[in-house]
């Protein structure tokens, strides 16, 4: 008997507290948390500076509504768009909501309605974001869906070019598909996307809900490409566990989101904003993002023997968003890792996704790699 709906396949494990990379369950057993709550607690659990920011704000003001000016939202917006082609921010409470805002803004601005999305993409569970998502399992049973999404295979240049006709308002893309299997956008497609957007007057929306906030070794994953987004969506890591989402947009979109066009009660709530400001202060300096990139390379190097001996088919991703493609189903390995004290998540049926906090130590990376090697190697028969 449960008082909860059964919409999550929950593991029979109840985590009660955490510090940095380590979490503890109700029986007192410790685990290395290489899920970060799915790319959320990017700065680790109970980070003292973030706890302090939240505590201080909680004594001043919890909520005041967007009826009033918000100097704190202004400062957060500035830190998010600094050094990008984007100029303005809208704050909401989740990734799906950030994508809803992007869908609405791109349609209103372009006065067109078709949005190109990709197979295996994930954009959230609200009606618009679900319709945009390129995975049948997410949409099953909820039809008819919104019609205006045109889904093409990921990394298929020809299909993309064919889909990009004069009705297209926007291309909505993840630079690395997180939920869909840690699939990295081919560099070859970058120029195609840029050309299509320019020639057909198509807006480029990059969904950085999972890849943003320094997860891949730069503040945003698109910064490692030549893409020039008109809109970027964020959530997950932005509040380190405090719910907040954001849509960032270029200067030219400003007038299309005038007073009364869009909104949400809690968006840019003072508690969320105080936390997110501390997160960007800590996670955006180059010294920090460079370390994330180095840790990602180190972890990849530690795991590379598993490629050489055939236990893994591929290691994909960037920074600390890594996907280990197994030769078979990932689920049994994930269970074994949990028993050995390491929490990881799948991404599609055959991929183990590694999402440690970006603050993870070298020693913790080594411990996790040892656990993974033990588990994955035990399944390979080594030829003698
Ligand atoms: C998680 C995720 C979303 C949805 O975010 P929610 O906060 O769960 O609504 C959207 N896009 C991507 C790429 C995601 O990983």
Image (cartoon, rainbow, N blue to C red):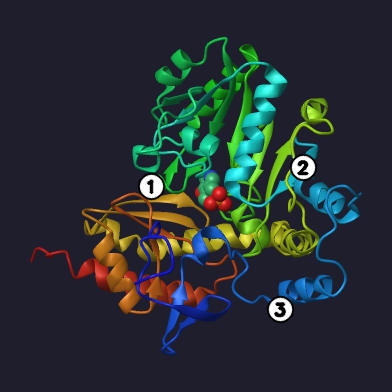
Q: Which mark is residue 48?
A: 3
Nearest to the observer: residue 232 or residue 302:
232
Q: Residues within 10 Å of mark 3 (few under 14, many from 20)?
A: few
Does 111 appear above or below 300?
A: above
Does 26 appear above or below 368?
A: below
- Is residue 227 visible in the rendered image? The answer is no
In this rendering, the label closer to the viewer, 2 or 3: 2
Q: Residue at x 76, y 36 (%)?
A: 86
Nearest to the observer: residue 296 or residue 119:
119
Upstream in sequence: badge 1 or badge 3 = 3
Q: Residue at x 41, y 89 (%)?
A: 27
Q: Secondary structure at mark 2?
A: strand
Residue matched to label 1? 181
Q: Position of residue 246 (x, y in %)?
A: 69, 46
Q: CA distance from mark 1 to mark 3?
A: 33 Å
Q: CA distance from mark 1 to mark 2?
A: 29 Å
Q: CA distance from mark 2 to mark 3?
A: 27 Å
Q: Residue at x 49, y 29 (%)?
A: 117
Q: Secondary structure at mark 1?
A: loop
Residue 312 picture quarter: bottom left
Task: Look at the numbered disc 3 and say if its residue's Cβ is closer than 8 Å to ligand 1.
Answer: no
Upstream in sequence: badge 1 or badge 2 = 2
Upstream in sequence: badge 2 or badge 3 = 3
Residue 382 is left or right of residue 37, and the answer is: left
Q: Which mark is residue 89?
A: 2
Nearest to the observer: residue 305 or residue 135:
135
């Amino acid at each position: 008997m449960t008082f909860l709906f059964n919409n999550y396949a929950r593991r029979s494990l109840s985590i009660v507290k955490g510090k940095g990379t380590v979490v503890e369950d109700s029986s007192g057993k410790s685990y290395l948390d290489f899920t970060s709550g799915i790319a959320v607690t990017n700065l680790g659990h109970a980070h003292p500076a973030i706890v302090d920011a939240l505590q201080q704000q909680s004594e001043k003001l919890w909520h005041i509504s967007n009826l009033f000016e918000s100097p704190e939202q202004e400062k957060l917006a500035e830190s998010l768009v600094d050094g990008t082609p984007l100029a303005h921010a809208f704050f909401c409470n989740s990734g799906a909501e950030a994508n809803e805002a992007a869908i609405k803004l791109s349609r209103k601005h372009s006065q067109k309605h078709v949005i190109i999305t990709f197979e295996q993409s994930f954009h959230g569970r609200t009606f618009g974001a679900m319709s945009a998502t390129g995975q049948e399992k997410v949409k099953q049973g909820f039809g008819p869906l919104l019609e205006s999404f045109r889904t093409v295979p990921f990394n298929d240049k020809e299909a993309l070019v064919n889909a990009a006709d004069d009705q297209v308002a926007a291309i909505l893309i993840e630079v690395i598909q997180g939920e869909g299997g840690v699939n990295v956008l081919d560099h070859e497609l970058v120029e195609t996307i840029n050309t299509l957007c320019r020639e057909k007057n198509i807006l480029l929306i990059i969904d950085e809900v999972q890849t943003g906030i320094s997860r891949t070794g730069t503040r945003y994953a698109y910064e490692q490409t030549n893409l020039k987004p008109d809109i970027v969506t964020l959530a997950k890591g932005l509040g380190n566990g405090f719910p907040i989402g954001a849509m960032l947009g270029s200067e030219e979109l400003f007038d299309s989101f005038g007073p009364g066009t869009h909104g949400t009660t809690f968006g840019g709530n003072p508690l969320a904003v105080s936390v997110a400001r501390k997160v960007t202060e800590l996670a955006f300096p180059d010294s920090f993002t460079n370390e994330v990139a180095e840790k990602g390379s180190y972890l990849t190097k530690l795991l590379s023997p598993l490629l050489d001996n055939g236990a893994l088919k591929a290691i994909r991703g960037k920074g600390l968003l890594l996907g280990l493609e197994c030769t078979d189903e990932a689920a049994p390995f994930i269970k074994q890792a949990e028993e050995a004290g390491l929490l990881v998540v799948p991404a599609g049926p055959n991929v183990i996704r590694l999402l440690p906090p970006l603050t993870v130590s070298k020693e913790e990376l080594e411990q996790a790699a040892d656990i993974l090697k033990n588990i994955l190697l035990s399944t390979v028969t080594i030829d003698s």
